[in-house]
Image (cartoon, grey):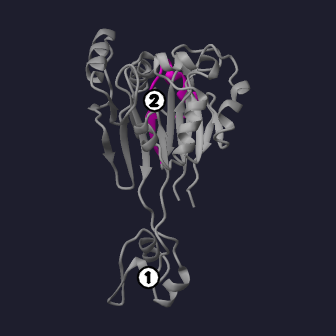
Amino acid sequence: MTDLKLIFLGTSASIPTTRRGLSSVAILRDGELFLFDAGEGVQRSFPKAKIGFNRKMKVFITHLHGDHCVGLLGLLQTMSMVQRDKPLTVYGPRGLVGFLRNNIRSLKFGLTFPLDVKIVREGVVLEAEDYIIKACIGKHRMKNFAYSLEEKIRPGVFDPKTAKKLNVPEGILWSKLQNGETVEVNGKKINPNLVLGPSRKGRKIVISGDTRPSATIKRFIFGADLAVLESTYFDDHHEKAKENLHMTAREAAEMASEAGVNQLALTHFSSRYEDVQPYLSQASDIHPNLIMAEDFLVLKVQYPD
């Protein structure tokens, strides 16, 4: 089983507050860090969240509004100052390459590690052995990508009694069978299907970035184990949400409920709301498995089974 946890590094929209930094969400999975957005000052959150600067990491930028990407510059500079040497790949919309190149040149800092910047398009962003990252375009003032991290199908539960009946010795051969590999015992091939139960689903996490509700986003978050959706406004500023192409808590909850999302976490709150808890009922009445995110809140994502 692979541990999977999500850490909110910044949960404010546009303007930081005394309690909330600007947008950034970290996902830690099997020793790898996936960072979604990098609001200004995000590098300050790394030590507090006990995240190291020199680790296997990929960064995904939803869009090029400052509260989602300006902190990337400080993060890269800090990584260089602590002598990071591991390669880093940053994914984001068109314009990200020029943004980084021009600012790194202007700020006159060099990098101590290889940096690769990849332009994102809708669909599969990258595929690894056991997970896929996908992107979907939201509805915002500029091109905004929502991202999903989706684990691939896992092998079924291993049956040790059947393995013993088939004379498979414990140890490395059991491990291979559990990983879905065919093994050979006394010249006879043992298919993993003989000792494994039905295949099991992996986990799905979605990060929305900034967006209005849309049919496209609703399809994208369908069946997610955890969806992190923006909730810049509450009902008292519904018209502003429509005008500025953001969501209210109620709209996010409605969309998540219709999409069959298991757990919903709301974030990206306007700085006008000093305390968001009084507004909780506007969304929890619609989607009861709901969390109002706070900086440094940690969510452990369990397997669906």
128 left or right, relative to 11: left
Of marks 1 and 2, which one's residue comes earlier in the chain? 1
What element does badge 1 sit on? helix
Q: Position of residue 166 (x, y in %)?
A: 46, 89
**Amino acid type, callout 1:** Leu
Cα separation between marks 1 and 2: 44 Å
Instruction: Check disc 2 and report the residue beneath it.
Output: 209
Residue at left 68%, top 24%? Answer: 276
In this rendered view, identify the residue nearer to me: 228 or 47: 228
* Residue 232 within the magenta-colored segment of the rendering: no
Residue 170 screen position, x and y as percent: 50, 79
Q: Residue at x 50, y 40 (%)?
A: 27
Q: Write down the region rendered in magenta.
A: 31-51
Kind of residue indicated by mark 2: Gly
Circle 1 sits on which residue?
Answer: 194
Magenta span contains residue 32: yes
